[in-house]
Amino acid sequence: MIASSFGSERAERILKPVAASVALGLIAIVGIRWYAYQWDLHMFMGAARDFAAGTSPYRGQGLSFYHPPLLLYVYRLLTFFPVWLACSLWYVLKLAALWALLSLWDKHFVRIRYSAATITFLILAFNASIYSDLVAGNVSIFEELLLWLAFTNLLKARYWAFSLCLILASQIKLTPLFFAVLLVTATEKPQWRWLFATVAGFGALFSCNQWLQPDLFRQFWKVSSQLDERGVDSSSLLALTRDAFDRLHVVTQQSKLDELVYVLGVAAVGAFSLWLLVQYRKAVAKLDQRLLIGFACLIFALISPRFKAYTYILLLAPTLYLLQVSDWRRQVPIACAVMLGLALFPHAHSLLPMRTAFELFASYMPLIAAAVVWGGYANVMYEAVAAERAGAAQPLERAALADTPVDQGAA
């Protein structure tokens, strides 16, 4: 045991600096090569210039602008600076937002021990979601910070602040308004008034798009409805469904069969999650809000029609939480089965029959990983319900995490 511990500590002393150097190197590369990377930022500024010149930025093809017109007023502020300064300022702000996000996770949701394993996880998890955001120059990291600020305020029962952060975050890509349901699902006493206030506040602010720029607002809806990104670009359930039908040569333009299957998938995930949530709320004496927030994040990832690589940043903290809260002594058979499945599953370019299935598996690995983590959360909640019904206390680590994040070294 002593020799094993000494070996682990020695390996950590070697691997941690290596992992940290890789992380810092990736950050430095993006900063140095600002002119080659951050293409989304260049697109945002180009759209703002078109807007200032009286031209529509909604081209609907290629690297086009897909955000609501209100965001053009924000991006226009960057056009007053030289390009190199605007890119540098944007990147520094993104790094500051990333630091704030990691600090929020560590303080309020899951204790982050920056070991070699944790740093590697943050670099590579969900198709390198953090790096994807930094290199693309997208606005996602700011959206994630607003969302986790909202979750933090939910833990502190500051519902007005939760609503404000969620209203602002939802103006960018609209779908985060889904998390308003936490006001009635992740609180001891459902906050129906704040739920209605959040939806009303979102509607009031979002309607400014129609009031200020009615023509651009109509174009925004038109190009958004035509957006069809798949695989690595958008690993979502709708994209997977469309890809599967296309590869099977099933025509769906007229029948909308792909969208029907997607709706059925969303209904299945939603129905099972709702049933489990109801059982959990009925059974446990004290809600684990962090568990419910993480569960909501996984549901959101599974049912969203569009989920870009950098949007998977949302799942990093919930995944770390699950790794820490799980009793791995009991989960070893499941973990071994998952690893065996990954090891045996053929490569995307395998010469074996059914190559289409292998290609889909490789292209939608982040979505599949999200489904596995969602299953892990469902298992934790089910075990909590079973323990309460059997009259047993919840495991110590879960009870501790319900009050304050605890590092158990799993991450």
Image (cartoon, rainbow, N blue to C red):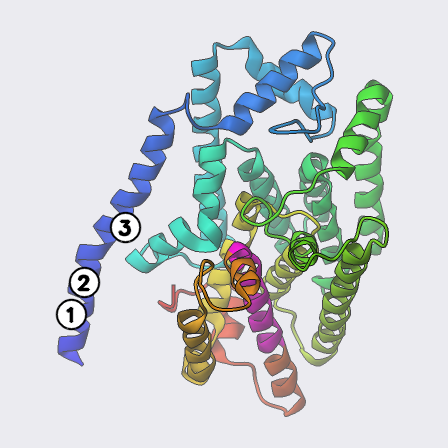
Compute the Cα span from label 1 to label 3. Answer: 18 Å
Q: Which mark is residue 7?
A: 1
Q: Residue at x 46, y 44 (%)?
A: 130
Q: Please indicate whether residue 285 sits to the left or right of residue 261 in the image.
A: left
Q: Which mark is residue 11?
A: 2
Image position, residue 226 (x, y; %): 75, 37
The answer to which image quadrant residue 182 occupies is: bottom right
Graded by Cα atoms within 10 Å as few (under 14), some (14 to 19) or many (20 or more), the crowding at tag 2 reads few
Q: Quadrant of the C terminus?
A: bottom left
In front here: 262 or 180? Answer: 262
Q: Which mark is residue 19?
A: 3
Label 1 vs 3, first from the N-terminus: 1
> Which residue is outermost to the bottom?
390
Q: Residue at x 72, y 35 (%)?
A: 171
Image depth: mark 1 or mark 3 in front: 3
Compute the Cα span from label 2 to label 3. Answer: 12 Å
Image position, residue 116 (x, y; %): 29, 56
Graded by Cα atoms within 10 Å as few (under 14), some (14 to 19) or many (20 or more), the crowding at tag 1 reads few
Residue 370 in magenta stretch:
yes
Q: Which mark is residue 228?
A: none
Residue 288 in magenta stretch:
no
**Where is 328 relative to 248, above or below?**
below
The residues colored magenta run 363-381
- Magenta-highlighted stretch: main secondary structure? helix
Confirm or deny contact between disc 2 and disc 1 (CB under 8 A): yes
Residue 208 visible in the picture:
no
Q: Residue at x 54, y 33 (%)?
A: 138
Image position, residue 327 (x, y; %): 45, 79
